[in-house]
Image (tube, grey):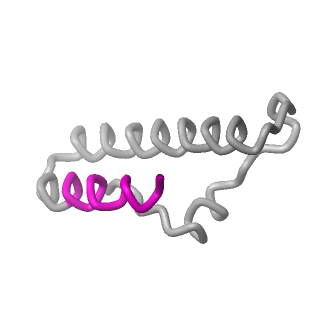
Amino acid sequence: MIAELNPVIRGWNNYHTRLPSSGRKRLRKLNGFVRERLRIFLKRKHNDSTRGSRRLHSNILVKLGLCQFG
């Protein structure tokens, strides 16, 4: 999944490199959205039924190789 997301994220970053600050804020929001959806996907995939008591930290997603917006 991360291998499929990274080229898309890199492409968006390359296309939007010279955005005004309002555009960069939108990319940060999009970054948070992608990370949260990926956390939900991974929790469901691994059958983790906890409700936020054990949150998958962003550093783990970076170690898995996820690029980020902006």
Locate residue 29, reporting x and y percent.
Answer: 41, 38
> Per the image, is 30 magenta?
no
Locate residue 45, reporting x and y percent.
Answer: 68, 41
Quadrant where the C terminus sits is bottom left
Q: Is residue 32 left or right of residue 30?
A: right
Locate residue 31, reporting x and y percent.
Answer: 42, 46
Locate residue 47: give its quadrant.
Answer: top right
Locate residue 65, reporting x and y percent.
Answer: 50, 69
> Per the image, is 8 magenta?
yes
* Residue in view at x 72 percent, y 49 percent: 56
Q: What secondary structure is the magenta-colored segment mainly?
A: helix
Residue 33 vertical position relative to residue 63 in the rendered view, above or below: above
Q: Is residue 43 left or right of residue 32?
A: right
Magenta region, residue range: 1-13
Camera-nearest residue between 21 and 67 = 67
Camera-nearest residue between 40 and 27 = 40
* Residue in view at x 41 percent, y 62 percent: 3
Labels in figure, total: 0
